[in-house]
Amino acid sequence: MTYTIIDVETTGQSNRITEISIFKYDGNEIIDEFTSLINPQTQIPIYITTLTGIDNAMVANAPTFEEVAQDILNITQDTIFVAHNVNFDYNVIRNEFKLLDLDFNRKKLCTVRLSRKLFPGFPSYSLGKLCKSLDINLTDRHRARGDAKATVVLFDMLLKKDETGNVFSSFLNKSSREATLPSHLPTAVFNAIPNTAGIYYFKNKVGEIIYIGKAKDLKKRVLSHFYSKTQKSLDMCRETRDIDFELAGSELLALLMEDAAIKHHYPKFNKQAKRNPKSYGIFSYQDRNGIMHLAFNPVKSCPNPIKVFHNIRECRLFLETFCSKYELCPKYCHLQEGVAQCCHYNIKTCKGVCANNEQPSNYNKRVQDALEIITKVEEHKVIKRKGRTSDEEAFVLIKNGVYLGYGFIDNTEQINSPADLDNFIIPQKDNLDVQQILRTHV
């Protein structure tokens, strides 16, 4: 069996290759080598130059990837592609070939995952720290040839382990996920993920949540990230060290849990659903002249809103409709501010309470009628869904059109009214995203 042990240096975000080094290894000795700087045909960022020492001047006269593509195909043909964090190097090279409309497919082995299996117990499996732990001489760190040469020595040590035969065979098995999982993610962590609905958390090496997702089938959805070749997925998987999850029981609960978790943690790889737009609530009060007002404020300043809206435009339109329908005053509905008498451009139904042409008691009666309709239209809703196990049910609670949260109840509990759910609810914040979820799924 022949291996090509490979390392690439790249431009970073765009991941164009700036240097490549390939050692062809027959299991006993190096039988061929290809090392070259590569002109990435794009600028190399300063921080990459600081890390690798490779700058724009060094690659200006280097060959492009297209010029060395055939050399790379030749040396890697009929070999197993080996690298430290193999998915990164393999996908970078594969993407370069795609830009040339060429296919690149090789069996692959990851020395990070192999080391975790055959050299268990080390605090870190980064190339630098692993070489230090195993007394492997590593020179020219973050240069392709130096890193590839150290990986050859590491791979030779892995080959000489007693358990190597079975481990290598299992890693190369087509049905194995070892080559698919992120290099630093223990297989046991992935195997513990169930095939059921819920949300999942990708975590980095310090336990920070970097991505949150939801799924009807957690294991299937998580695995799809590892097969994805998008730059976001590649970057995210390279940082992933652990995966946690919470069961939801149903897709609706998973969506609601995902939205709340994203807005709480703000993970770096969740670009959408982070927003938490300002909500507005309608409320009523009576001024010192005895006139009832309908007004609106941000929900934070409106403790018991009659009705909640998730943008100010919807709130004003709703008030305008009721103001016109019940012949209320735009001034006392706070659709006009700083005026002695109402003079709304659209609403002309005011009977003159603002000009002392109508008794406050008559006006207040129409305000009360409007309030009764607003509160009567809105129903208390309890949405039932499957629980996380067969022994429980899940519910979503909505009062007066406002989402209050969700909960899980054991089937043995006696629930006679919505008020009984208060002991089981997990309180949540209402927002525009939640309302869209509820409208779509209910």
Image (cartoon, rainbow, N blue to C red):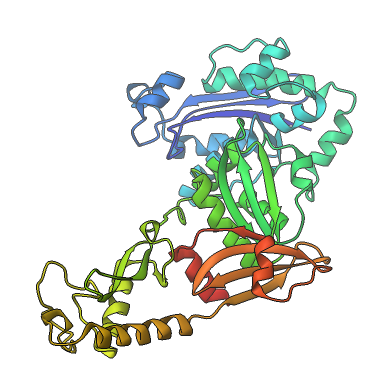
Q: Position of residue 356 (x, y in %)?
A: 13, 82
Q: Image point 40% across, 20% down: which residue? A: 50
* Residue 248 image offset from top left, x and y in percent: 69, 60
Q: Could you tell whether 180 is left or right of 411 in the image? A: left
| Along the line of sight, the residue nearer the viewer: 388 or 317 | 317
Residue at position x 41%, y 73% in the image: 307
| Residue 342: image location, x then y, percent | 13, 78
**Count of numbered circles in the view:** 0
Q: Residue 32: name its quadrant.
A: top right
Quadrant housing residue 21:
top right
Question: Does 228 sit above or below residue 401?
Answer: above
Q: Residue at x 29, y 89 (%)?
A: 326
Please tell me whether residue 62 is drawn above or below residue 97 in the rendered image: above
Q: Quadrant of residue 107?
A: top right
Query: Which residue is pictured at 45% across the width and 21% down the height?
Result: 51
Q: Nearer the viewer, residue 151 or 224?
A: 224
Instruction: Determine whether, in the image, residue 362 is placed left or right of residue 100.
Output: left
Q: Is residue 281 above or below residue 348?
A: above
How far from the left and from the top, in percent, is residue 114? Answer: 76, 30
Of 62 and 200, nearer the camera is: 200
Tell me the quadrant of the picture where the C terminus can be found: bottom right
Residue 344 appears in the figure: no
Q: Judge by depth and name the residue closer to the eye, 65 or 435.
A: 435
Side of 390 where 408 appears, left or right: left
Q: Quadrant of the N terminus?
A: top right
Left or right of residue 122, residue 98 in this image: left
Residue 151 in sight from this viewpoint: yes
